Image: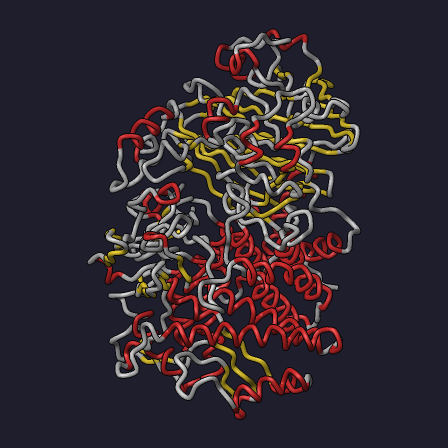
């Protein structure tokens, strides 16, 4: 047996012997402003449940808190509340601006960092920086409102509130003794040069289900004595919170403050936000006679000298006699060492700094596991005893997804952007988590293809704002990636996983084939496909001039989808040829159909007399009502997506299936044209394998000239989403209307898709990860027969495998410090290089500036940016 104790816990978890996942960081940093909490006719979630309501109003679908945890059903929750003596109310959750308030959309305006976590959450650590002067809520809102889209966003550091180090570092650590015994250590550091006081309220509460499910018995939390609280729930059981004795313990109810929110009279003064008034006014005596409730907190008034630190310990356990004795520190030391032991093999050979980058990336990834609950039909109908939702919602958002009934723990794109999922985000997130918890990664991958999520017609839900939108279909390729890596590392062939994924994806594949087919047979449409503003115009809206758009990336994704459905079928046919060999032939035929369509449409932009026109890019094609076909020759990630349709198949595996192999041989002997625009199949007897791919060796060489040109797509930190050559805007007149797109390396300068996402220049890690993988796959086949300059124009030549390594190094650039200790991801915030209490803190942004590698968008989009650990 592996002597790695964290691996042993994982094994017992997946063998269903012990439930180490029962408690975890499943509490969101923000729940307010979600689609689910919106019960208005207009569907404006931000206005329906704003940040101002969060401390006063009960949530319906989840909870949030600061540095918190919950059980896997989010029944019982624990998190921190803080007060610096200056703020108008307690700090209970992360603050940020709404989509309408920000000059580039929503954005969190806090400083917090995820520093460590293990897959079973046996050890977790995070850091929150809390100013000692009044938190600048109004300044952050007002200043961002003043700025237009040409200006940078106004961040918390920009207020200067941290300039004199007048803040507290609040370090939150959790260590599990076992699955139901969680030790909590809160360390407060006064970073100021003078004495400061912090009120600390470690808060335990039950999520309010009783108001929405009258049949459910209301749970209770009661004061036992000066150092114990007892929480009792009919199904979860009884938990005791043990803590250092304190003179003040507050107990209230997790109930909406009706008076403040809706202007109605409260039945009791003990409502959700009662602690705020008690602490900020000092009036805690009314709580002396309130022994039970559903929300409780011991109160610690901590006065720290300059530079002083202090620690508060707690323990949440099903054992009523669990103590804070000598065992406490020993368990923390053990779990911390076990975390180090678990990650050591995964960082072997890395520099200490690179190992630290990986650890924090994994920590953010695991801290972003959240409880997600959304019963669409219940949301449409409303809850018993509550007002009936407006009739408009039956014709609005997600009304045709009434079967969707979700209640799971998922890795989310961002811990702050409230718990939500997107189909392709979650697919990338599953790759990022695979190295540390393969079984959980598999579960995340097939979850949305579960009947609870997948529509009867085969669609997978795209993202919460519009489940019916289309995200790129990645799951077949990633399923094969998981299967192949597990086979290579452990010799295990997980046929059950492949069968599950294959069976669930087949109806989705048919939906794409039948519903998203393009104007030309074999080409595809799909709308924005997660790339937001990358197009010349909004691909999710009506096409200018009333035309239709066959999309290069949608078609390339479908070619990739088809190849990997074929590859999975071929693998399964080795075990069950009667069932799966015919299916492998079916997907082969579809692959040929798509590639033939590309051959035909490419004649619109490939000139046989101009070799350079056959540069490997594919382009969107606009079909006008009068029959004109107009290619849109933009060099962007859209045109690079054909790289991803690549796969090799060894002869032994292929030839074991006579019907399938014959189809391959027939195609090789009788290709559709003597001079195809794109490669489809290549066979190299010396390699003992067959290449399926859309690009020939010559096209790969030409494409690399653009891909690795610093004047085009190659940025200091990876491949740009749009070529830098479009600093001089690309314009095209369509139906008398001038359309323009230009290279925008930083924040978006358009309001398209809310303005908080930009695919017109920045570097995005998920598709860069796919580019690296494609270069490796082509490189393994072509070897040194394809040589490219790295970068273009230089004398440094290398294979495509060398190119993949070259690109991987560029993608690490954003996080590695220079000789001054400055990490490009932090931009001009030099405090991260000069302040010892900031120096080793790293943020994993949503995307990165195409010129400077400064982090952009969500500052904790660790889900897919954690892919840096795979490079």
Name the residue at 44% across, 53% down: 527
Please name whichever residue, 607 or 96, is drawn nearer the observer in this view of the structure: 607
Residue 193 in the image: x percent, y percent?
Answer: 36, 28
Q: How far across and down, in percent of the image, does residue 424 sit?
A: 52, 54
As drawn, the residue found furthest toward the left would be 728
Query: Would residue 35 appear left or right of 98 to someone viewing this image?
Result: right
Please state the total of marks drawn on the protein image. 0
- Where 265 falls versus 395 (above or below)? above
Q: Is residue 718 visible?
A: no
Q: Nearer the viewer, residue 535 or 735?
A: 735
291 to 82, vertically: above or below:
above
The quadrant of the image that shows the N terminus is bottom right
Give coordinates of residue 593: x percent, y percent: 52, 74
Which picture quadrant has residue 154?
top left
Residue occupying image coordinates x 35% and y 64%? 627
569, 298: nearer the viewer: 569
Q: Residue 306 sits in which quadrant?
A: top left
Q: How is the image coloured?
A: secondary structure
Q: Residue furthest front?
A: 626
Residue 719: x and y, percent?
36, 63
Q: Is residue 649 visible?
A: yes
Name the residue nearer the viewer: 437 or 104: 104
């Amino acid at each position: 047996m592996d002597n790695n104790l964290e691996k042993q816990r994982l094994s017992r978890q997946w063998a269903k012997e012990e439930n180490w996942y029962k408690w975890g960081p499943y509490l969101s940093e923000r729940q307010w402003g979600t689609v689910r909490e919106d019960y208005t006719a207009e569907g404006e979630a931000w206005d329906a449940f704003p940040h101002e309501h969060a401390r006063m109003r009960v949530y319906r679908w989840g909870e949030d808190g600061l540095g918190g945890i919950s059980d896997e059903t989010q029944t019982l929750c624990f998190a921190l509340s803080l007060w610096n003596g200056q703020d108008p109310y307690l700090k209970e959750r992360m603050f940020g601006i709404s989509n309408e308030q920000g000059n580039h959309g929503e954005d969190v305006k806090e400083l917090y960092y995820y520093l460590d976590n293990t897959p079973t959450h046996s050890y977790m650590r995070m850091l929150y920086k809390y100013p000692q002067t009044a938190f600048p809520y109004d300044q952050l809102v007002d200043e961002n409102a003043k700025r237009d889209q040409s200006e940078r966003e106004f961040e918390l550091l920009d207020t200067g509130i941290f300039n004199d180090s007048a803040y507290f570092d609040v370090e939150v650590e959790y260590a599990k003794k076992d699955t139901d015994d969680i030790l909590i250590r809160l360390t407060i550091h006064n970073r100021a040069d003078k004495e400061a006081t912090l009120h600390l309220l470690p808060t335990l509460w039950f999520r309010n289900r009783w108001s929405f499910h009258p049949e459910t018995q209301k749970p209770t939390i009661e004061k036992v004595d000066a150092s114990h609280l007892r929480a009792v729930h009919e199904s979860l059981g009884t938990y005791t919170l043990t803590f250092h004795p304190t003179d003040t313990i507050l107990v209230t109810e997790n109930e909406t403050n009706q008076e403040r929110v809706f202007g109605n009279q409260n039945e009791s003064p003990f409502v959700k936000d009662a602690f705020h008034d008690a602490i900020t006014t000092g009036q805690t005596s009314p709580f002396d006679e309130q022994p039970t409730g559903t929300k409780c907190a011991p109160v610690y008034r901590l006065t720290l000298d300059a530079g002083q630190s202090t620690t508060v310990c707690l323990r949440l356990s099903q054992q009523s006699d669990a103590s804070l004795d000598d065992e406490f520190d020993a368990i923390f030391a053990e779990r911390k060492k076990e975390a180090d032991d678990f990650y050591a093999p995964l960082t072997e050979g890395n520099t200490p700094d690179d190992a630290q980058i990986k650890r924090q990336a994994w920590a953010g990834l695991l801290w972003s596991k959240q409880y997600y609950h959304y019963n669409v039909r219940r949301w449409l109908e409303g809850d018993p005893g509550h007002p009936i939702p407006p009739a408009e919602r039956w014709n609005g958002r997600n009304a045709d997804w009434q079967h969707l009934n979700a209640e799971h723990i998922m890795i989310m794109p961002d811990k702050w952007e409230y718990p939500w999922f997107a189909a392709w985000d979650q697919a990338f997130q599953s790759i990022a988590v695979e190295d540390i918890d393969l079984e959980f990664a598999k579960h995340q991958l097939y979850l949305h293809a579960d009947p609870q999520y997948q529509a009867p017609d085969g669609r997978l839900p795209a993202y919460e704002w519009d489940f019916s939108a289309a995200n790129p279909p990645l799951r077949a390729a990633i399923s094969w990636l998981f299967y192949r890596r597990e086979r290579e590392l452990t010799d295990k062939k997980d046929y059950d996983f492949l069968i599950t994924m294959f069976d669930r994806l087949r109806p989705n594949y048919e939906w794409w084939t039948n519903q998203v087919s393009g104007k030309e047979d074999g080409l595809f449409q799909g709308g924005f496909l997660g790339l937001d503003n990358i197009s010349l115009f909004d691909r999710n809206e009506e096409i200018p001039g009333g035309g239709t758009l066959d999309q290069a990336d949608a078609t390339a994704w479908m070619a990739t989808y088809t190849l990997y459905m074929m590859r999975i079928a071929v693998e399964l046919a080795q075990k069950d040829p009667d069932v799966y060999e015919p299916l492998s032939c079916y997907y082969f035929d579809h692959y040929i159909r798509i590639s033939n369509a590309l051959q035909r449409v490419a004649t619109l932009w490939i000139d046989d007399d101009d070799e350079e026109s056959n540069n490997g890019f594919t382009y969107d094609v606009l079909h006008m009502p009068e029959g004109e076909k107009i290619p849109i020759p933009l060099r962007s990630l859209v045109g690079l997506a054909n790289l991803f349709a690549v796969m090799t198949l060894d002869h032994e595996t292929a030839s074991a299936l006579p019907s399938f192999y014959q189809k391959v041989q027939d195609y090789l002997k009788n290709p559709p044209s003597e001079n195809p625009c794109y490669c489809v199949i290549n066979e190299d007897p010396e390699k003992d394998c067959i290449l399926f791919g859309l690009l020939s060796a010559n096209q790969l060489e030409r494409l690399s000239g653009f891909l690795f040109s610093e004047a085009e797509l190659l940025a200091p930190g990876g491949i740009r989403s749009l070529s830098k050559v479009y600093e001089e805007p690309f314009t095209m007149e369509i139906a008398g209307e001038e359309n323009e797109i230009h290279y925008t390396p930083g924040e978006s300068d358009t309001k398209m898709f809310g303005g908080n996402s930009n695919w017109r220049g920045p570097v995005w890690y998920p598709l860069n990860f796919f580019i690296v993988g494609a270069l490796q796959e082509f490189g393994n086949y072509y070897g040194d027969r394809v040589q490219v300059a790295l970068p273009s124009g230089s004398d440094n030549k290398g294979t495509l495998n060398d190119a993949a390594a070259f690109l991987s190094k560029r993608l690490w650039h954003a996080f590695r410090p220079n000789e001054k200790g400055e990490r490009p991801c932090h931009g001009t915030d030099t405090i991260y290089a000069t302040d010892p209490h900031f120096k080793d803190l790293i943020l994993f942004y949503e995307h990165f500036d195409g010129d400077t590698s400064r982090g952009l968008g969500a500052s904790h989009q660790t889900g897919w940016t954690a892919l840096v650990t795979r490079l």
